[in-house]
Amino acid sequence: MNINIAILGFGTVGSGVAEVLDMNRASITEKTGRNIVLKHILDLREFPDSPYKDLVTHDAEEVFNDSELDIVVETIGGARIAYEFTKRALSLGKSVVTSNKELVSTHGVELLKIAAENNCSYLYEAAVGGGIPIIRPLYKCLAANEIVKIAGIVNGTTNYILSKMKDDGLTYEEALKGAQANGFAEANPTADVDGIDAQRKLSILSTIALNGRYVAPDRIHTEGISNLTLDDIEFEKEIGATLKLIAYFSKAEDGRPCIYVAPHYVSGSNLLSNVGGVFNAIMVEGNALGESMYYGKGAGMLPTASAVCSDILEAATTGGRPSESRLWREEGADITPYEDIVCDIVVRSAEGTDKLKEAFSGYDVSVLSGNAVLVKSIRHKDIDLTGLPGAKYFHYLG
Amino acid sequence: MNINIAILGFGTVGSGVAEVLDMNRASITEKTGRNIVLKHILDLREFPDSPYKDLVTHDAEEVFNDSELDIVVETIGGARIAYEFTKRALSLGKSVVTSNKELVSTHGVELLKIAAENNCSYLYEAAVGGGIPIIRPLYKCLAANEIVKIAGIVNGTTNYILSKMKDDGLTYEEALKGAQANGFAEANPTADVDGIDAQRKLSILSTIALNGRYVAPDRIHTEGISNLTLDDIEFEKEIGATLKLIAYFSKAEDGRPCIYVAPHYVSGSNLLSNVGGVFNAIMVEGNALGESMYYGKGAGMLPTASAVCSDILEAATTGGRPSESRLWREEGADITPYEDIVCDIVVRSAEGTDKLKEAFSGYDVSVLSGNAVLVKSIRHKDIDLTGLPGAKYFHYLG
């Protein structure tokens, strides 16, 4: 059976989708009984050297007026034209698959609703963790669990920078330049290094973990890595931990979720501490399953295309019928204010551990090194570093 | 919508299924729109102290004659009565979900065919990796990939024993006794320590990786861990690697798969080397995705029940309609004979590295320590230890 698709936006991911579908055509057809036919590529650019150049059009009408079109692949990015095209495709009853974390995290509620109303699917496995299977495992494989915790390295750019600072002793600025030279960071790296990309992905993961109760990205307290110093990195060895930018979700005792993005010292005994370079890994704890982890390439042409193609095949084999469980709710989730979140922190001060223990008396404090302690279960608003000049604290993940 | 289920075999996993469904009932219903009703428990035993005691019956006819039954959970184990019950349920058009690796690996071809013929599903997410999502990710999330490699720690008992030998300096016999005392190994540990359990799981993973071309367990060369000595374990430190029982699948240059179970020295830079205790982890490489890894609890009541329940919910929400891609083929896969498989090995000999280099001249050999070398890309039948008295070799995973 032929399934006709159009790719909107023929950049890295879009062209990767075309390549993966051709590279594995025989195997895909054998497995699914479907032959995926790329009919249109919508892009403003020409691709004179591409084997797909004859499929390129600049005219969106040509795509949307094709009554034989089954599935639309949105790999444009951003939340403007991609938003308009996605709404239009779903309104026509065409399933849309995407890697666009910005669009899913900001307009997911509306777009999933339009899909359901038009009996088609809006699928976004590639929006979190690149090629790593995570959206479908959360929805399907952990369906019988309550998700109690998520801790993820979900941004490859920042993980690459942190790995380079650690392994090669580079400053943040040097490591960022190297990442840009190697194509692992964009010319304007803000979305990555300030944690915005991780924030969008955590918005999606949290919403799913809360059975569709929407957590908008701008409600998530977010810290990036641009203020980290080589001292912070070198301190890793002293305490046997590694600095990682962690997207964090957990259920507090009252059941309300605690959600934030911030650098964490991750204990050497935690598998996440060994996830280096541009790799991503996401730890998910379910109340039946316990801890599980998903690891792989969080970005890149073919890995991300692998995830997009898995959604194409899902839409193709289910006839586009949406799963009701995938709907998000308009009302929004009731989340814990950042100031009230209870966490574990590492505090470092040249004043020494006696002063530190004094400052955090009343808490469960353990000494990590000559000038650092681990303080357990402290509320953010109770973290008080006055009286400890030059002291610095980070979150800790055991 | 109510979905009526019966649990056949109320042991650890079966009772875990009942517990998970009750524990997370509200959340499951919210997510899926289905209320899973446990109607029958078939077991030879009585469970006078169980909250489910009133559902227990010893009469299979009571279960199979219930026309309102939707899904059968087979958690009996083995391939005798479980086989008969599964055939009967599928023939009646009732979907069956199971954690029974022995039955799936030996009769999967026939049972999946009966399911397809009767428009229902035979699902076995829990048969490999316990609670870890692996079957569905392989089928769905990596659907657009050719699977080129799998390396898995798929047996928790052996991993626990190896971890104890390493961490506590116990002999194999001591570690096994400890595992039995802690409930991590059975009184008759043969299926685990001889690698039979891993063989069955690899049979399932390989068959899926080959698009349903069946790899029967008895075609898989299998070595267990019962011959490992403390010397083998202590040698780990010398070469910065950890001994793990690995279920291995890869595509040879001619496209034919290489499939075997054997202890491997796993390099410290490989995440699998850090998977300790009863945890499982499976590395899967796709030709688009690259390397990915799935980690979690490979056994235990609630983790395994978590996977069984995910299959119950899949069968419930799809109305039991089978996915054609899940069929296995009768013809069987064309696999590389063990003797012809090319692999990397670590060879240890008191004769020293000069003698070792001489014995493996013509190969890519690197010195690992004073009395051990790594030999790359050698065919099994060409491994010749004559002339190296007392020498020993193991597979190596970089």
Image (cartoon, coloured by chain):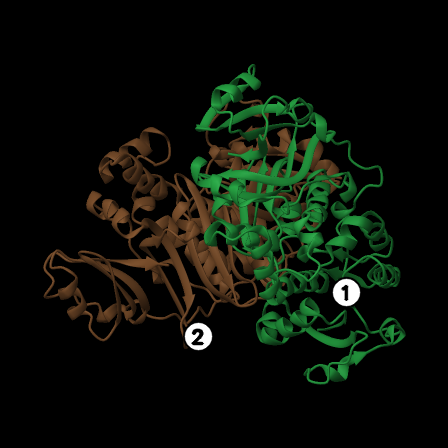
Chain colours: A brown, B green
Vertical position of residue A308 compared to residue B76: above or below: above
Q: Give me the chain letter of mark 1.
A: B
Q: Residue at x 42, y 44 (%)?
A: A275
Q: Residue at x 68, y 67 (%)?
A: B13
Using the rendered image of the protein, determine whether residue A226 is visible from the camera's viewpoint. Answer: no
Q: Give me the chain letter of mark 2.
A: A
Residue A255 numbered tag: 2
**Quadrant of the image containing the C terminus of chain A:** bottom left
Q: Residue at x 58, y 32 (%)?
A: B393
Describe the element under mark 2 as helix, strand or loop.
loop
The residue under label 1 is B76
Q: Do the numbered discs 2 and 1 sit on residues whose CB atoms are within 8 Å? A: no
Badge 1 amino acid:
Ile
The image quadrant that residue A306 belongs to is: top right
Q: Could you classify mark 2 by the number of other residues whose Cα lies within 10 Å: few (under 14), some (14-19), or many (20 or more)?
A: few
Residue A85 numbered tag: none
